[in-house]
Amino acid sequence: MPDRTNLWAILITIISSVLIGFALSTLAYRFRILRVPGGNFVERLDRHVHLTPAQRKQIGEIMEDTRGKIERLRRDYQRERRDALWDSYDRVRAVLTPEQQQIFDREFVPPWGSRREVEGLPSPSEIPSPAAPQ
């Protein structure tokens, strides 16, 4: 077992390393050697080009408008992607025999669930077969 002097030396070294790292990183952020990732775009722009209050307001409105557009695009993309994947599953399923379709439905359901589950439609087994012509 190491003696107590070695344990104290290791402990002091670890604590001083953490404190020195904290002090250096604080100074680096303060003097802008390191920058906070991201940050508010308008505030960063204002620091560099000295915006007027009217410019800050206009740019803030532009950023809000753009944020909404980006969110709508993201939702549209996700919906189109999901629809394309569902379409591929439907096309693959159409190639299979009824027995293979049962296995496919059981074993190869997409991770987000079947299209019928998500859209609230009945499963193929719940759909009554058409009455035989008389």
Image: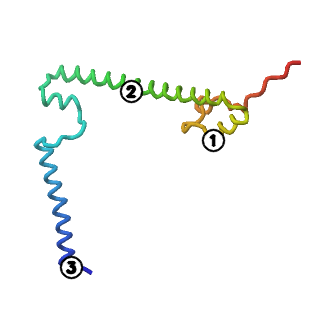
* Viewer-closest of 113 and 94: 94
The picture places residue 14, in percent across and down from the top left corner, at: 20, 65
Q: Is mark 2 on a helix, strand or loop?
A: helix
Amino acid found under the numbered disc labelled 3: Arg
Q: Which residue is drawn at 65% across and 40% down?
A: 106
Where is mark 1, residue-wise? 107
Q: Which residue is drawn at 64% across and 30% down?
A: 93
N-terminal label among 1 and 3: 3
Q: Which residue is drawn at 44% across and 27% down?
A: 75
Amino acid found under the numbered disc labelled 2: Glu
User: For the residues marked 1 and 3, what is the alpha-carbon distance in whole angstroms?
Assistant: 62 Å
Where is mark 3, residue-wise? 4
The picture places residue 53, in percent across and down from the top left corner, at: 16, 23
N-terminal label among 2 and 1: 2
Q: What element carries label 1?
A: helix
Amino acid found under the numbered disc labelled 1: Glu
